[in-house]
Amino acid sequence: MRLARPLENLIDQLLKLPTIGPKTAQRLALYILKMPVEDTRKLSRAITEAREKVFPCSGCGNLTDIDPCHICEDPDRDDTLLCVAEEASNIVALERTGFKGRYYVINRSFKSMEDKELARIDFQPLLHLLEKRGVEELILALNPDIDGEIMSRYIARILSRHKVKITRLAHGLPVGGDIEFADEITLRRAIEGRKELS
Ligand SMILES: [Zn+2]
């Protein structure tokens, strides 16, 4: 059976999203068809508005609609603590733990990267932040997988001449897991029990 063109189109668009397979796309599309028209307008407006108005903060890489973001502008943050995250979505999880330092988001995938590819990632903004904020401790909050490990060691190496203590989250986070999906208590414990990178 051939579906109505607009419905087929909606399913095709939903299929472009991560973790959405054909069955889920179809279920979501059929659900959307039953929503009040005004709600569907709000949904499509919200998608376009978020896409157009949200961007990475020039100071830390956090997703924001004002630059610098509210975390960079917050005077009550501890300037001496800087937490390095892989993606802005990780900040949401880290904020839930009550962490009061500042952040630096790498904002790009470094999966399976070799050293020479890592060298092409621009870490100048991070070095600039270290100087500007007088950071004393850099907390590497990268995912506990092989890529996070390689990146942690790489950052430790490029910062070896800086007088900054480098720590990383304590174990307890599932190896191969994702910071974004760690529960609040595990993540808070991992921050509190952070260890210096040896
Ligand atoms: Zn910021």
Image (tube, rainbow, N blue to C red):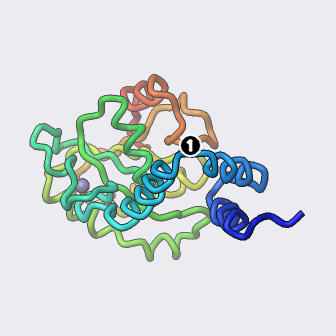
Q: Which residue is mark 1?
A: 178
Give the x, y percent position of residue 156.
Answer: 39, 55
Ligand 1 quadrant? Answer: bottom left
Give the x, y percent position of residue 97.
Answer: 36, 29
Count of numbered labels shown in the rendering: 1
Name the residue located 62 percent from the left edge and 38 percent from the top edge: 175
Residue occupying the far right of the picture: 1
Name the residue located 51 percent from the left edge and 52 percent from the top edge: 37
Q: 99 left or right of 141?
A: left
Q: Nearer the viewer, residue 130 or 94?
A: 94
Q: Nearer the viewer, residue 113 or 180?
A: 180
Q: 35 left or right of 161?
A: right
Give the x, y percent position of residue 127.
Answer: 25, 63
SS for callout 1:
loop
Give the x, y percent position of residue 131.
Answer: 16, 59
Name the residue located 46 percent from the left edge and 32 percent from the top edge: 170
Q: 93 left or right of 14?
A: left
Residue occupying the far front of the picture: 37
User: Which quadrant of the view contains residue 102?
Assistant: top left
Q: Quadrant of the C terminus?
A: top left
Residue occupying the far left of the picture: 75
